Image (cartoon, helix red, strand yellow):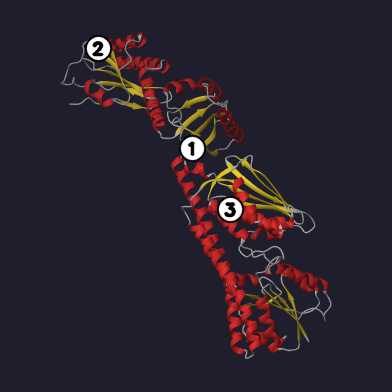
């Protein structure tokens, strides 16, 4: 069973994404975090515990307290010590090419997805992870 | 027929036999004549001697650079050449009969004596020439549209042109004196002398040219900016002989530069705003649109009535959020485009009272203690609706992000700094980690605390309003201790006058 971290402060988007993930893959655990800091705290807490760590992280860029970029700064330092291969996807409503370019400077980022994310794309990610 | 010229070979003179007298005649028959040298006993007697030796009615000395003039009237020209080869002039004679060798030789000896005499006596010709040259160069220096001053090694004036000091009386006074004596004489502020001495010593001690700009009021009270240069000049022994200073009036260029700099600043600010605006549109408008389209997709796919209801209930707040964001954006654009903002004298106490009334419910609920001190500045000229909004936003922020462990205390005060008024709003609330949020503090949609009402519009709007009025906003904060927001108001009344 796969574990997915969904880091986004927008309840509507979280609700819809969960709905889509469940519709393509029934057997998974989804954990929600309303901002980057909550997610980083959790990751630090479960560092090294492969069964608790996620397989996939979806992270928004625009969030309160700790936004997506700040989260990525922390996560880039953290992920070599986590002890588990994790695929991280930025999921943003931003269509700015600068932000896509900037995301490439983070080693931990697998891909930059622009909202709305098609059901097919989520199915593809879920199937190969 | 013209006279044959005298030749000079290796510094020796060879007077040539005379030819027939010129047809124009008119030559005085006795005594000697000199061009500008008569009246000097030594010269006169030597010339008389020369005239007698040559049996000529006249002996004269003509300027070295007028041999043609001399040849027209005289048959014998003996160049007067000093030992170092300087051509001093010609001894010119018209003998009544050809000269024999003895007389020619005697004349040559007389010419040598004349040469020596001319070397010893600063002759009028040379002096005149030097004066002419001096006048020529001084004229150039005086007519140059720059200001020029030349100093000795002790910073005393050796020369100053009218570009630097226009009144001749002042120019005459300053020669041989320094800036301190000049300032005392003119009863002027000594600080100028201090500044000039410092620059002089900088040039003297560094041994290099220095450059700087200075702005001083002229006699009419207009500020004139000069680009100044000062450099030391050394003699052949390496001793400092002069320090030359000159300045060019660059006031016009300076004004243009300032205008351009202001324009560049304005443009880059507008560009930043444009980039911000694109980011806002991308993040804050596109996000709710994406949600709406996704919800509608779900609605279309779902056949369940209960789920329809749920999806529709989720649609509503998204649309509301979109509306709020949209309105805020429109308002912020209106503020930025509002070039003719109406301002009036606003009483800060009154403004505070209105804010407190608006926030009364929260103040009572939290038992907040709010104090003010508007002693330093109680009235400012501002757009009243902006000031109300600024007060409301900042004070409601202080209330919203109060520390749960203590009674909220907010202190609002003003102080004067130069000709500007600074408003500060200090609280003992949650504070903000400025190290983390330094770069995006006043951005739209930026939220620092997990608070249900936090939308991230307040500070963005406040900043927009403050900047539209030409002011600045900044913050100091320590997490868990509190924040102080500062707003510097540009003095609008002064700008208008």
Disc 1 from disc 3: Cα separation: 46 Å
For the residue pair B241 and B97, the one nearer the viewer reads as: B241
The mark that comes first in sequence, 1 or 2, is 2
- Judge from the rendering whether residue B104 lies leftward or rightward of residue B469; answer left or right: left
Q: Secondary structure at mark 3?
A: helix
Q: Which mark is residue B55?
A: 2
Dot 1 surroundings within 10 Å: few (below 14), some, or many (20 or more)? many
Q: Are marks 1 and 2 on the same chain?
A: yes
Q: Are marks 3 and 2 on the same chain?
A: yes
The mark that comes first in sequence, 3 or 2, is 2
Which of the image's four quarters has the N terminus of chain B? top left
Residue A97 is at least partly visible in this image? no
Disc 1 from disc 2: Cα separation: 68 Å
Mark in front: 1 vs 2: 1
Dot 3 surroundings within 10 Å: few (below 14), some, or many (20 or more)? some
Q: Residue at x 65, y 59 (%)?
A: B441
Could you say where residue B81 lies in the image, as x and y percent from the top left?
A: 38, 23
Q: Which mark is residue B479?
A: none
Location of mark 1 (residue): B226
Q: Against B5, is A103 above or below?
A: below
Q: Against A98, is B235 above or below?
A: above
The chain to which mark 1 is attached is B
- Judge from the rendering whether residue B246 lies leftward or rightward of residue B376; answer left or right: left
Q: Quadrant of residue A121?
A: bottom right
For the residue pair A10 and B251, the one nearer the viewer reads as: A10
Q: Secondary structure at mark 1?
A: strand
Location of mark 3 (residue): B388
């Amino acid at each position: 069973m796969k574990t997915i971290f969904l880091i986004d402060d927008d309840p509507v988007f979280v609700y819809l994404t969960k709905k889509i993930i469940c519709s393509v893959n029934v057997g998974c655990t989804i954990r929600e975090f309303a901002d980057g800091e909550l997610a980083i705290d959790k990751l630090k807490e479960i560092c090294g515990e492969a069964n608790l760590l996620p397989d996939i992280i979806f992270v928004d860029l625009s969030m309160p307290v700790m936004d997506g970029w700040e989260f990525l700064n922390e996560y880039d330092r953290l992920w070599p010590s986590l002890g588990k291969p994790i695929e991280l996807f930025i999921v943003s409503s931003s269509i700015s090419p600068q932000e896509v370019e900037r995301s490439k400077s983070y080693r931990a980022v697998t891909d930059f997805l622009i909202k709305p994310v098609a059901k097919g794309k989520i199915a593809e990610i879920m199937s190969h992870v | 027929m013209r006279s044959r010229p005298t030749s000079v070979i290796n510094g020796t003179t060879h007077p040539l036999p005379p030819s027939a007298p010129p047809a124009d005649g008119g030559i005085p028959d006795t005594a000697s004549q000199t061009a500008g040298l008569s009246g000097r006993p030594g010269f006169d007697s030597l010339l008389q001697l020369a005239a007698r030796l040559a049996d000529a009615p006249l002996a004269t000395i003509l300027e070295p650079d007028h041999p043609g003039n001399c040849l027209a009237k005289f048959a014998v020209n003996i160049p007067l050449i000093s030992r170092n080869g300087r051509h001093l002039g010609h001894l010119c004679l018209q003998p009544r009969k050809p000269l024999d060798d003895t007389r020619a030789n005697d004349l040559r000896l007389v010419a040598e004596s004349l040469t020596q005499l001319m070397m010893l006596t600063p002759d009028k010709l040379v002096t005149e020439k030097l004066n002419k040259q001096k006048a020529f160069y001084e004229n150039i220096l005086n007519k140059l549209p720059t200001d020029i001053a030349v100093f000795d090694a002790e910073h005393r004036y050796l020369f100053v042109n009218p570009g630097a000091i226009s009144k001749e009386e002042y120019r005459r006074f300053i020669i041989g004196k320094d800036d301190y004596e000049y300032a005392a004489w003119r009863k002027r502020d000594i600080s100028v002398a201090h500044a000039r001495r410092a620059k002089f010593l900088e040039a003297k001690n560094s041994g290099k040219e220095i450059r700087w700009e200075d702005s001083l009021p002229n006699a009419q009270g207009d500020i004139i900016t000069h680009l100044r240069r000062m450099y030391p000049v050394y003699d052949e022994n390496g001793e400092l002989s002069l320090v030359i200073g000159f300045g060019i009036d660059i006031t016009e260029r300076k004004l243009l530069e300032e205008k351009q700099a202001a324009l560049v600043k304005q443009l880059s600010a507008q560009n930043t705003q444009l980039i911000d605006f694109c980011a806002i549109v991308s993040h804050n408008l596109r996000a709710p649109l994406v949600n709406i389209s996704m919800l509608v997709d779900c609605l279309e796919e779902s056949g369940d009535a209960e789920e329809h209801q749920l999806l529709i209930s989720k649609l509503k707040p998204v649309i509301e959020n979109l509306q709020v964001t949209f309105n805020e954006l429109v308002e912020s654009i209106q503020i930025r485009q509002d070039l003719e903002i109406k301002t009036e004298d606003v009483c800060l106490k009154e403004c505070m009272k209105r804010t407190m009334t608006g926030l009364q419910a929260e103040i009572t609920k939290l038992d907040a203690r709010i104090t003010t001190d508007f002693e330093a500045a109680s009235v400012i000229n501002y757009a009243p609706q902006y000031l109300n909004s600024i007060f409301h936003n900042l004070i409601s922020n202080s209330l919203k992000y109060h520390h749960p462990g203590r009674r909220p205390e907010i202190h609002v005060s003003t102080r004067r700094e130069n000709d500007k008024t600074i408003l500060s709003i200090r609280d003992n609330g949650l504070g903000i980690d400025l190290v983390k949020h330094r770069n995006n503090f006043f951005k739209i949609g930026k939220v620092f605390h997990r608070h249900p009402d936090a939308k991230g519009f307040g500070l963005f709007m406040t900043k927009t309003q403050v900047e539209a009025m030409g002011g600045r906003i900044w913050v100091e904060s320590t997490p868990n201790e509190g924040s102080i927001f500062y707003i510097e108001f540009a003095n609008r009344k002064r700008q208008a006058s």
